[in-house]
Amino acid sequence: METTQKTGLVVSAHSADFVWRAGGAIALHSARGYAVTVVCLSYGERGESAKLWRQPGMTLERVKAEREKEARAAAEILGVADIQFWDLGDYPITLNDDALFRLVDVYRAIHPAFMLTHSKRDIYNHDHPAVSDFAQNARITAQAHGHNPGQKVLGAPPVFLFEPHQPEQCDWKPNVLLDIGPVWEKKRAAIECMAGQEHLWEYYTRVALQRGAQAARNSDKAIKYGEGYEAVFPHVTETLA
Amino acid sequence: METTQKTGLVVSAHSADFVWRAGGAIALHSARGYAVTVVCLSYGERGESAKLWRQPGMTLERVKAEREKEARAAAEILGVADIQFWDLGDYPITLNDDALFRLVDVYRAIHPAFMLTHSKRDIYNHDHPAVSDFAQNARITAQAHGHNPGQKVLGAPPVFLFEPHQPEQCDWKPNVLLDIGPVWEKKRAAIECMAGQEHLWEYYTRVALQRGAQAARNSDKAIKYGEGYEAVFPHVTETLA
Amino acid sequence: METTQKTGLVVSAHSADFVWRAGGAIALHSARGYAVTVVCLSYGERGESAKLWRQPGMTLERVKAEREKEARAAAEILGVADIQFWDLGDYPITLNDDALFRLVDVYRAIHPAFMLTHSKRDIYNHDHPAVSDFAQNARITAQAHGHNPGQKVLGAPPVFLFEPHQPEQCDWKPNVLLDIGPVWEKKRAAIECMAGQEHLWEYYTRVALQRGAQAARNSDKAIKYGEGYEAVFPHVTETLA
Amino acid sequence: METTQKTGLVVSAHSADFVWRAGGAIALHSARGYAVTVVCLSYGERGESAKLWRQPGMTLERVKAEREKEARAAAEILGVADIQFWDLGDYPITLNDDALFRLVDVYRAIHPAFMLTHSKRDIYNHDHPAVSDFAQNARITAQAHGHNPGQKVLGAPPVFLFEPHQPEQCDWKPNVLLDIGPVWEKKRAAIECMAGQEHLWEYYTRVALQRGAQAARNSDKAIKYGEGYEAVFPHVTETLA
Amino acid sequence: METTQKTGLVVSAHSADFVWRAGGAIALHSARGYAVTVVCLSYGERGESAKLWRQPGMTLERVKAEREKEARAAAEILGVADIQFWDLGDYPITLNDDALFRLVDVYRAIHPAFMLTHSKRDIYNHDHPAVSDFAQNARITAQAHGHNPGQKVLGAPPVFLFEPHQPEQCDWKPNVLLDIGPVWEKKRAAIECMAGQEHLWEYYTRVALQRGAQAARNSDKAIKYGEGYEAVFPHVTETLA
Amino acid sequence: METTQKTGLVVSAHSADFVWRAGGAIALHSARGYAVTVVCLSYGERGESAKLWRQPGMTLERVKAEREKEARAAAEILGVADIQFWDLGDYPITLNDDALFRLVDVYRAIHPAFMLTHSKRDIYNHDHPAVSDFAQNARITAQAHGHNPGQKVLGAPPVFLFEPHQPEQCDWKPNVLLDIGPVWEKKRAAIECMAGQEHLWEYYTRVALQRGAQAARNSDKAIKYGEGYEAVFPHVTETLA
């Protein structure tokens, strides 16, 4: 099946990151027929669930369950083909070789046309850069002919890094601006599934408006909502226009 | 006419730069129907014509005439629609407001879909960064509604910076790799018009092969010859695949 | 008089820049008794007045008059003590030695406790970095004992650089976040004086909200609106808490 | 008790680092009533005790004992409220999850108003950058609501990075200069407790004089001795003057 | 023996890296009487042996054996005094404390006059930066007086970083250009031992020609073949000419 | 004469810069038989002569005369072969094409084996970066075959940039450390000729001691006094040891 349908891969440190940071890209490509796989390495159960922890009698398992429910609802709205929860723990996240080879298997299974993950640096978040390094390490391992010989090796899918929370502090530069206008309503709806982080709904709506205005300014197109990404690899092209 | 045909603009400090550094892009887009304008701000008559100066009795005017002849021959091979020689002097180049507004007029006349010029820094060449700054200044002035009101203002054509001679020393990073395989023979023929700089023919052939190999490595495509560019502005796009 | 009242200096390339980029800082310090001088080096009459130029029969002089009127209204709301219009032209701006020494005179006249101006780089605007360099050059000249000997030389007022339109593209990093909550209503009112650039009102409101949210995140304080600045010089202090 | 007294935290890779690099800051804040906790993750017994190892019959345990004695003497002079020796080993240091959570406990116990630790990079020292990353990871974990729910989570104390031995080689930039003149005598006395590294006494005295001269130059104040720090986070403020 | 003969150390992630990236430096110094030790941490058996894996019935052990044979042949041509294969695995490589102390032992055994290893960053290769960090960590540990007290501690041999495959993408800057003309034939012969990577023979020949041309341009010398390195530490010298 | 004696060139913005920043290099090379030419583009009469201006009745001409006297005395101690005062003005310095071609003539006259000048950036000084750019522009122009054809063109002398006053703030990195121990007494004596800037004597003595300590640390040599430089071009070499 993976030989005929185009695919994309999103590696998310915590179970809400893919929504805030890549919801537009996911919805856009899903709408165009891409089967997008989202791997949530943790639930963000310890470090990104403040509101849930303020409820009396809260437990780690209940937080995880709530977070998974929210993420599944968002994924459905965005048209995600496959969402996986690996429950590796957070703050700090635990990224061992088993997890690495499991992610290599995902690359080999779907041969994504692109991969999205976190920024290289984040002074506010220790898990995000660790996941970025990990996801890129897995991509390179999936390219190795000697890893599970006989499998088709991975090619060179481009990698795009999510916008971090305070981009300038993280030395992240958006060299790609994606027009997400056609799917904005879906992204906003997915965002609203994140009941535990309601304070971020308007924040990320403003981010989308600012990136949209910037995309318009760089292209003469009437773009209203955008997502910014930092491309890791050079853009190989047949035209400059 | 400029409203119907697509156009491109190349701003070259010296009369051979457009060949070594952008010959592939010019030939590619010309072949696709773009009318490419090349502005040679100087002939490189003082600083980039060593071989000619070794001839006995050489004069500045003869060097310029020879350089123009070579550049015109190369431009014809590459399919350049319009090549202009502004004779502003070199080493150092003189870039005053008259020249600036003249370049603004070019932008306004052709409304290029893209603009190519030199890198921001070059420790081996003082004219190249000056021209890069100048050409971008003119682009911004061409966007001003109060400059020659009534004319159609320039939009936001992307700007790509040429590969300098020793790229790492110039902090130049090729974030765009262009497949120039289909027009390589033309570029090589244009390079060979530069009789005065024969020692560079093989150098720039090797550059093309290395950038081609890198383009292949970043794309899984069978690319043999490439040109590298540094995009100044973020890439606005509707897809990441 | 300048020996008793504390002062601040804002050097603005175009007549609206001080509003979008430093309106909060101006209003805050004015409210605290600082006499803030704003120098508008040009009106932005050519490059930042698109809406005015769309009116039939518009002339350069009418644009300038309109821009001055708007800027004066905004300045009054913000509590600016002195606003000056130097009419040096824009796109490109003309910054000669006469202008430099005139700005030196301003420094020497008011001995500002801080100076605000544009970012060092801006790929969308050629005037802004030129003004940043110019204003810092004037500051250094004002420190020279041999310039107008007998005058009291300038000390070392800190310099803070405005947020440019697309900060990451300009390598601008906000290492100072100013809480402008107490004066936000004034800044918004001043912004609304810029009738010719209404499309930017909401853009800069969102900028203030994002910088406010970031300031809150970096301080545990309930900050809603902020302005970001890049400090040029190290922060000299007697405490780290 | 920690709710009423203000506190600071210093995380030192080896047992002398807090003296050379932060002795002034510690003495200043201690004198102002801050209870400063210093965590020495190792003794620097292998890599920073050359003089001791030159004594005949020296053993690892004796080196550690000697280093602890020196550090305790220096801490007393500086007014340190609590000095802890975690004995994690050095060259290389071993920083596992147990140590991480132990440091999280310290953050939660004292809720420091500021945290000081090593620079992000150091080409001469492998432990220092590892400790910087570790101490910041612990700070972020201490902010997580799901870590030991019920405890008060950590806020956002600013983090300042020590001056490394050869600052330019480590890409460390002192954006904060602290006037340590009032406590210089204490810092010098603490430095002289480091009998095993006498060759560094004058070196670090000169560092203090250079940073002092620079602080004076940036502030118009009569500052003689300084310490430089690199602030990790933006400075949130209510005034620019 | 090591006290009288000068030595060099090359730490290679995979068994062919020392040939492509440092073959010239090795041959040059060997020819001058240096005993050069090459440590191949892995065979590159999984990630850099694509051609071998295309042979039917290939096994990991056969790949390793073939790679070792090739590397030994190349080492002999280059005049390597000692080549070691540590078989730590690749893609990803496993670098634990045992390996670290083993490398410390090598430093202590030979006291190299220089050390060569991989670049700090490489977006195409996860093992190379890990090895660079590891080899520098071992060098620092070898300088520690408390590590195996009684042994002579390591001094401060300069470290030079290999050219990575796509240098600009790896932020690698060649601040040292080595003239390898006198040994080019040996390097080419060593390269041709790498039967499994024949597609790289011409690629690295072109690299040598480009670095040679650049070395000539920076020195006025007639240099044809070069190798580029990034020096980690400042160059201590008694002359600038 | 210039064909037989080796030469060096120092381009100094103000008449004392060559002493503080390059006095060691000048004395070292002079002692070894190099004829060192120092070009003082201005006297620093306005911006770097505070003490002189505090004398009653001081005039610009008297300041210049005093500065020239001091510089000549220092030059004699350092063994300078030729010191020139171009009196171009300072704060700001005026660098026009006449001055450029005059400096080209100097390059062509002496064919220096190395050139020393200011750093690329300096937030405290506007003249220094301007001079650095100017001196490098002249060097490139001197390489142009079409400039004064018939003269021998300049080769590629290495360029080293002086240490600025606050190096980290100027993004200056000392990748070359010069042992100036053998001539330290001369440098100190030359420094003491600068009667007008006595407050800097100890400052620059400490700089020499710190750079010396760093040079020792990077080389295992017993170096006490050093000067740091930033090399602009890659170091072309035949050996890494």
Image (cartoon, coloured by chain):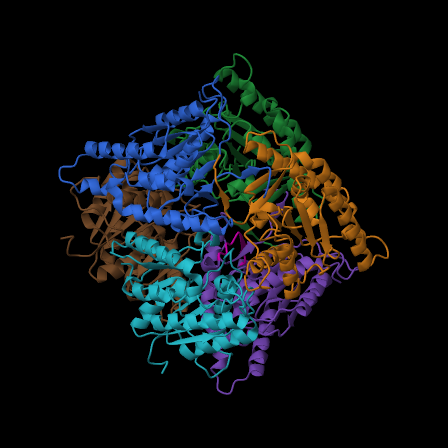
Chain colours: A cyan, B brown, C blue, D orange, E purple, F green
Task: Return the x and y of residue F188 as percentages of the image width and height.
Answer: 66, 30
The boundaries of the magenta stretch are: E171-180
Does residue D225 appear left or right of residue B169 in this picture? Answer: right
Residue D228 vertical position relative to residue D44 in the rendered view, above or below = above
Q: Note whether residue A232 is visible.
A: yes
Task: Return the x and y of residue E21 as percentages of the image width and height.
Answer: 54, 63
Q: Find residue D209 and report its image quarter.
A: top right
Q: Does the magenta run of residues contain A67?
A: no
Task: Return the x and y of residue C141 as percentages of the image width and height.
Answer: 45, 27
Q: Which SS does the magenta portion mostly show? A: loop
Q: Nearer the viewer, residue C100 or B11?
A: C100
Q: Find residue B89 and report its image quarter.
A: top left
Residue C195 vertical position relative to residue E57 in the rendered view, above or below = above
Q: How many marks?
A: 0
Residue D240 vertical position relative to residue C148 in the rendered view, above or below = below
Does residue C138 appear left or right of residue A89 in this picture? Answer: left
Q: Find residue D32 and report its image quarter.
A: top right
Q: Note whether residue E31 is visible.
A: no
Residue at point 46% right, 24% down? Answer: F87
Task: Return the x and y of residue C200 as percentages of the image width and height.
Answer: 29, 46
Q: Residue furthest bottom?
A: E57
Q: Nearer the viewer, residue D213 or E45?
A: D213
Q: Residue furthest right?
A: D57
Q: Nearer the viewer, residue A200 or A124?
A: A200
